[in-house]
Amino acid sequence: MTQKLPNATLALVLAIISYVACCLSYGLGGLVLSIIAFVLANKDRKTYLLNPENYDNYGQVKTARILAIVALILSALIVISSIAALLFFGSLEGLEQWANEMQQQQIEAAQ
């Protein structure tokens, strides 16, 4: 009789949520959730590799692992770009000030 891997569904759900959350909260939510999903998927992968004939939902674990990796990469890129933007502009106020200066330059150039 085969059984299901214990964390497969949870890992898949977390991977899907992390994929969506990577675009929210400057990527931090997606980063945390994708790491948790990846760890859970790897734990189930190790369990499956010990006795592959005992489990029947390994495909779900593979899918969760792939989604977690994709979400992890996207989240990391968003976190890095968010940090770079904050360092470049200083803050949101700096971004607004820069936009105002650009508009002023365009107005002066048009005259």
Image (spheres, grey):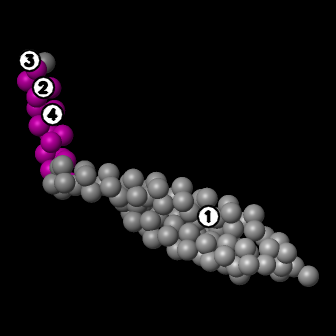
User: Residue flagged by tag 1: what amino acid is it?
Assistant: Arg
Going from the N terminus, do you reach mark 4 or mark 2 first?
Answer: 4
The extreme top residue here reads: 111
For label 3, the SS is loop
Residue indicated by mark 3: 111
Q: Position of residue 68 (x, y in %)?
A: 56, 63
Numbered range of the magenta stretch: 92-109
- Residue at 83% x, 79% y: name it: 54
Q: Main secondary structure of the magenta part?
A: helix
Going from the N terminus, do you reach mark 1 or mark 3 first?
Answer: 1
Characterize the local packing of mark 1: few (<14), some (14-19) or many (20 or more) Cα atoms within 10 angstroms: many
User: Residue flagged by tag 4: what amino acid is it?
Assistant: Met
- Asked whether the residues under the numbered discs 3 and 2 touch, taking CB atoms below 8 Å apart as contact, a structural biologist would say yes
Cα separation, mark 1 vs mark 3, equals 58 Å
Cα separation, mark 4 vs mark 2, equals 9 Å
User: Residue flagged by tag 3: what amino acid is it?
Assistant: Gln
Tell me: residue 78, above or below residue 54: above
The mark found on residue 65 in the picture is 1
Characterize the local packing of mark 3: few (<14), some (14-19) or many (20 or more) Cα atoms within 10 angstroms: few
Going from the N terminus, do you reach mark 2 or mark 1 first?
Answer: 1
Cα separation, mark 2 vs mark 1, equals 52 Å
Tell me: residue 91, above or below residue 95: below
- Image quadrant holding the N terminus, namely bottom right
For label 1, the SS is helix
Residue indicated by mark 2: 107
Going from the N terminus, do you reach mark 4 or mark 1 first?
Answer: 1
Residue indicated by mark 4: 102
